[in-house]
Image: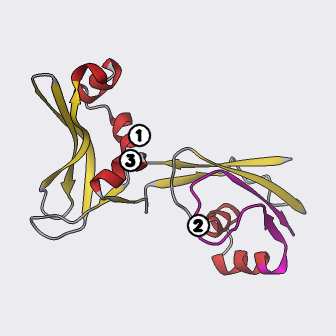
Amino acid sequence: MLNTWVVAPTCLPIVLRRCHACACGRFRANGKFRVNANHKLIDAWLLALCTACGETTKLTVLERRNVRSVRPELLDRLHDNDLGLTAELLQDPVVRRRNRIALDWDGAWRLDTGGSDHLDREAVDVSVLFAARIPVRPVRLIAEGFGLSRAEVERLVTEGNLVSAVRLSGRLTGDFGFTLKR
């Protein structure tokens, strides 16, 4: 039987960018947008607050775009300060590259294993699904899911009792599967 684990966000990640006021490197996005139109052109920014001093930074979402080229649904979501749109934009690689930011997901996600019925079987097949592009070490997920130490999981990989089609070292942001033999 295939078990499904889900890695899901619990809150928005911390935005890593240097504050010009206090030199802190962490901002919290609160879901607020600023939209400015000048004749036929529109700009939109996602606002984030420095975790140390409270200074606001603007992350560019739209820059000097023709108003007619922007989907009306997107404009509505910007004007409504849609928190879901904030999450989507923070995960968008184009927005992150344009604004030269990185994300810190520590403490902003959880692992849902769907119960502990898999602990007593000899071989366990698990499919791990990501609800968002959260970079997590597979060894950490497996250790958390089975209640093992990371060193124990590393030992299982070395012994060949934990196998996967993907490399289990490093970080992953996409779905993967593995088999654990006891």
Q: Could you say where residue 82 lies in the image, as x and y percent from the top left?
A: 31, 31
- Name the secondary structure under disc 3: helix
Q: Please give the name of the residue rendered at 34% of the width and 20% of the height, measured from the top-left corner.
A: 73
Q: Give yes or no for contact between labels 3 and 2 (Cβ–Cβ under 8 Å).
A: no
Determine the image quadrant of residue 85. top left
Mark 2 packing: few (<14 Cα in 10 Å), some, or many (20+)? some
Q: Is residue 54 above or below residue 21?
A: above
Q: Nearer the viewer, mark 3 or mark 1?
A: 3
Q: Could you say where residue 26 lies in the image, as x and y percent from the top left?
A: 26, 63
Q: Label 3 is placed on what type of residue? A: Val
Q: Earlier in the sequence, mark 1 or mark 2?
A: 1
Q: Nearer the viewer, mark 1 or mark 2?
A: 1
Question: Viewed as shown, does residue 176 lie left or right of 65?
Answer: right
Q: Please give the name of the residue rendered at 84% of the width and 75% of the height, measured from the top-left corner.
A: 160
The residue singled out by tag 1 in the image is 88
Mark 1 packing: few (<14 Cα in 10 Å), some, or many (20+)? few
Q: Label 2 is placed on what type of residue? A: Arg
Mark seen at residue 56: none
The residue singled out by tag 2 in the image is 137
Question: The magenta stretch spans which residues?
Answer: 158-182
Q: Could you say where residue 99 lies in the image, as x and y percent from the top left?
A: 28, 53
The way the protein has been coloured in the rendering is: secondary structure
Question: Viewed as shown, does residue 161 lie left or right of 40?
Answer: right
Distance in Å between CA atoms under marks 3 and 1: 11 Å
The image quadrant where one finds the C terminus is bottom right
Distance in Å between CA atoms under marks 3 and 2: 24 Å
The residue singled out by tag 3 in the image is 94
**In the depicted view, which residue is nearer to us: 177 or 65?**
65
Q: Please give the name of the residue rendered at 77% of the width and 61% of the height, measured from the top-left corner.
A: 165
